[in-house]
Image (spheres, grey):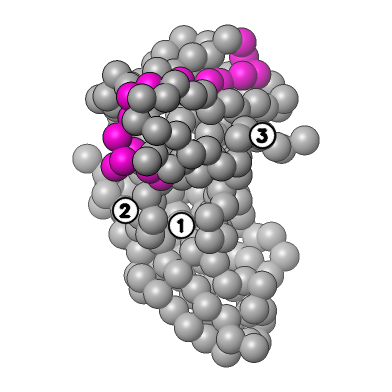
């Protein structure tokens, strides 16, 4: 099983809402990632978790709050977002941070009104 | 700092043609290089992973080569089909700075015409 599952597939939220994106993998990978992708651009790294600890935060605004409850799950909590935060949010995993093949989920399409 | 470019930005070919997509990177000290395809509005699908010690990898009609000394990788697609239409991205995992994660190229948008 080389699958990374993301929910929801689509999300529309107002600027005052609080919502969460979820990601799950059962490949035994110890590194999990959040990427943000705008149209016709490559993915941009937001956060990296390694062994359930936050390893990298690429200077992401605090309105995005990641959480890694266990080695299989990764959440991204969203609060007070701006319309420019509308994008495709991609979760990925790899065997360890810095090594191995990167596997992506199908993404969550977020629209902020 | 590692930078990755891909040429061409877009490519349109008739069905059945063999084609080559190019990926260039500025620092030859890489850990590995991975090719992905992305369909519109979807996630990235891993195609091939080449370790720094390897020269090429093959999967079906796809063949990826790696020349670290010249900072280049190519993705060869044989007998292209309309279903190959997608954006192809290469990503390099730098070797010098272990903490730096994959650096993505901007992608090549491929259209295979029936």
Q: In which quarter of the image is the C terminus of chain A?
A: top left
Instruction: State the residue at coordinates (50%, 73%).
Output: B110
Q: Mark 1 points at which residue?
A: B89
Residue A64 in picture, x, y percent from top left = 37, 23
Instruction: State the residue at coordinates (56%, 60%).
Output: B39
Residue A21 in picture, x, y percent from top left = 53, 28
Q: Quadrant of the N terminus of chain A?
A: top right
Label ID, residue A106: none
Residue A59 in picture, x, y percent from top left = 25, 25
Question: Whole-Å distance between the Cαs marked 2 and 1?
Answer: 10 Å
Between residue B7 and residue A72, name the one nearer to us: A72
Residue count near mark 3 (Cα–Cα under 10 Å), binned few <14, some 14–19, many ≥20: some
Same-chain check, marks 2 and 1: yes
Residue sticking out furthest to the right: A1
Instruction: State the residue at coordinates (49%, 62%).
Output: B88
Instruction: State the residue at coordinates (49%, 14%).
Output: A67
Q: What element carries label 1?
A: strand
Residue A90 highlighted magenta (yes or no): no
Question: Whole-Å distance between the Cαs marked 2 and 3?
Answer: 28 Å
Q: Decide: is A19 above or below B25.
A: above
Label ID, residue B4: 2
Question: Whole-Å distance between the Cαs marked 1 and 3?
Answer: 21 Å
Between residue A13 and residue B54, name the one nearer to us: A13
- Chain letter of disc 1? B
Q: What element carries label 2?
A: strand
- Chain letter of disc 3? A
| Range covered by the magenta-colored residues | A70-87
Q: Name the residue under label 3.
A: A5
């Amino acid at each position: 099983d080389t699958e990374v599952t993301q929910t929801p597939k689509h999300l529309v939220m107002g600027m005052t809402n609080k919502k969460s994106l979820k990601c799950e993998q059962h490949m035994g990978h110890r590194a999990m990632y959040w990427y943000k992708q705008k149209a016709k651009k490559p993915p941009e790294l937001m956060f990296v978790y390694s062994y359930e600890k936050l390893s990298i935060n690429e200077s992401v605004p605090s309105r995005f709050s990641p959480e890694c409850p266990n080695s299989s799950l990764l959440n991204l909590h969203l609060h007070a977002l701006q319309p420019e935060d509308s994008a495709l949010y991609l979760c990925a995993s790899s065997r360890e941070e810095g090594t191995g093949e990167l596997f992506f989920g199908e993404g969550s399409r977020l629209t902020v009104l | 700092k590692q930078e990755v470019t891909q040429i061409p930005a877009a490519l349109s070919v008739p069905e059945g043609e063999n084609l080559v997509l190019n990926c260039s990177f500025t620092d030859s000290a890489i850990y590995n290089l991975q090719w992905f395809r992305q369909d519109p509005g979807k996630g990235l699908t891993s195609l091939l992973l080449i370790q720094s010690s390897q020269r090429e990898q093959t999967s079906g009609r796809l063949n990826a080569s790696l020349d670290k000394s010249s900072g280049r990788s190519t993705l060869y697609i044989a007998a292209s089909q309309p279903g190959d239409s997608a954006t192809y991205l290469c990503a390099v995992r730098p070797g010098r700075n272990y903490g730096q994660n994959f650096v993505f190229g901007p992608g090549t948008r491929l259209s295979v015409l029936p």
